[in-house]
Amino acid sequence: MTAAYRIAVIAGDGIGTEVIPPAQQALDLVAARCGFTLHYDRFDWSCRRYRETGAMMPTDGLDRIAGHDAILLGAVGWPGVPDHVSLWGLLIPIRRRFRQYVNLRPIRVLDGLPGPLREPGEVDFVVVRENVEGEYSEIGGRLNRGFPDEMAVQEAVFTRPGVTRIADYAFDLAATRRGHLTSATKSNGIVHTMPFWDEVVAERAARHPEVTWCSEHIDALAAKLVLHPSSYDVLVGSNLFGDILSDLAAAIAGSIGIAPAANINPEREFPSMFEPVHGSAPDIAGRGVANPLGALWSAAMMLDHLGEPAAARALMTGIERALADGAVRTPDLGGTATTRELTEAVLAAVPAHPPTPPDPQR
């Protein structure tokens, strides 16, 4: 019996609407070649919808997508709609309702990609970001608005279950790779939450003796990541630290336009969500020059999560071949190609007979 998957598609804002159609094209191509089908349900949830209705999505929006096998997201955010409105009205509720507590961001410098720091092939690591608590909690508020003594309080929330599960996920992932994990901390300056994070990570490390590990302060780690990116394998960090490190790492890889991300519910009780890192990019939206590779790589991660590793590998092979060829590049990669032209180059490079798959997160 042919496998069939139901995908919730939220193109969102800006270039999200330009890179999601190429991702669907690629998904349909590899699905046909690998013998399964994908059914898409499209949702117009976006800043445009917010401006028209006062809400990023309908009140029952999360119920509508709870039964899908996965969610494919383009981008969220647009000028005129405050970021905290767009993110807390769509992206963050999805992550939290569906307990997508792992944000996974693989970083590689691929052949043919003009990475700014090192030669291709030397950089291959994964950032594992805690995705639902930490510094991005909802606890806090503002007092005395408009007065000279106005103040704002934001509480960071670190729970033992939350730190334990993200640490275990990261150690398990490191065990399948090169066997090294780096934990991002700032326990010399943040006196309560970061020592707690360090203690729990150390406890979980004792349960993973096959993995060597160390803890590094976030400021020093950011510098070392730029100076010696090839020395890292798996990095694990809190919501804030993981967010910052993964965007820095995307730049190290050559362009944030190629960077993928997965918001994962490891227990598979709820759908996981896959999205390019680049955001809505209002400065280039509508020009047809957005780099589709972040969305395509995110789609490959989605296929692997769905249990279709051969299709995931086929799509990644197309991406790798198109980049290595170097003839077609979007402006962020130093070329003049359009989104459509780079998409066509990737599709043409997808092998007719899918190769044996390693993990597309690598």
Image: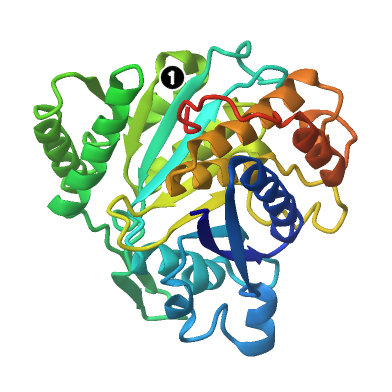
Q: Residue at x 47, y 33 (%)?
A: 361
Secondary structure beneath disc 1?
helix
Q: Residue most toward the front?
A: 1
Displayed quadrant of residue 189: top left
Indicate the position of residue 316 as horizontal and vertical percent values: 61, 32
Colour mode of the rendering: rainbow
Indicate the position of residue 143 as horizontal and vertical percent values: 34, 78
Q: Residue at x 67, y 25 (%)?
A: 320
- Residue 185 appears in the rendering: no
Would you call the spot at circle 1 few (<14 residues within 10 Å), some (14-19), or many (20 or more)?
A: some
Q: Residue at x 48, y 78 (%)?
A: 64
Displayed quadrant of residue 110: top right
164 or 322, nearer to the observer: 322
Please indicate whether residue 290 sits to the left or right of residue 98 in the image: right
Indicate the position of residue 209 as horizontal and vertical percent values: 13, 20
> Residue beneath label 1, please?
224
192 or 21, nearer to the observer: 21
Q: How many marks?
A: 1
Please indicate whether residue 268 sits to the left or right of residue 261 in the image: left
284 or 96, nearer to the observer: 96
Q: Report the amino acid beneath label 1.
A: Lys
Q: Residue most toward the right?
A: 336
